[in-house]
Image (tube, helix red, strand yellow):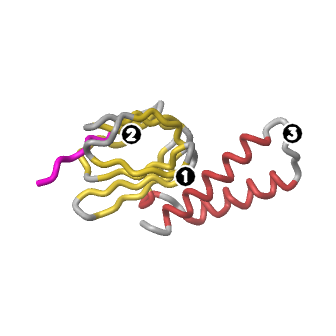
Amino acid sequence: MAEELLVEIVTPEEMVFSDTVEMVTIPGGDGEFGVLYGHAPVLSTVKIGELNITKGNRKTYYAVGKGYAEVTAKKVTLLLEKVVKASQIDKERARRELSEAEADLSRMTKEDVGFQEVSERLSMAEAKLKAADKA
């Protein structure tokens, strides 16, 4: 059996995931990157997007908020604001969140207070819908 990578996903509220896996693909601040056992050490920001974990030739998808990733040869620790497993995403609710964020943004300029927060809501709704389509 191949060496397995320990992945831990943590939010301020809870430990969301802790298990050995074959690979994790992370939406890094500088672009998506995959991590296998033996990866070089890396510290990276994580942007809002889709994360996936491969174990036993099966992928599990998550919509994730901003955060940080610490990668070592044997372990990946993800400290994230928000994590939603694709199979637990309510698509209708995510579509409403997307529509509401789009409507809010249409009434704002980049200089408006709250613009960044609304942009992040929009990105998270898009990530939820993308991940849910793969569940």
3 or 2: tag closer to the N-terminus: 2
Near-viewer residue (71 or 129): 71
2 or 1: tag closer to the N-terminus: 2
Residue visible at 45% across and 68% down in the picture? 134
Q: Where is residue 7 shown, x and y percent of the image?
A: 31, 42
Q: Where is residue 27 shown, x and y percent of the image?
A: 51, 49
Any magenta on residue 4? yes
Q: Where is residue 52 shown, x and y percent of the image?
A: 40, 55
Compared to 89, does 7 lie above or below?
Answer: above
Q: Dot 2: within a 10 Å radius of its alpha carbon, few (fewer than 14), some, or many (20 or more) residues?
A: some
Residue visible at 47% across and 30% down in the picture? 12
Report the amino acid beneath label 1: Gly
Picture disc at residue 9: 2
Q: Which residues are magenta?
A: 1-7
Q: CA distance from mark 3 to mark 1?
A: 24 Å
Q: CA distance from mark 3 to mark 2?
A: 33 Å
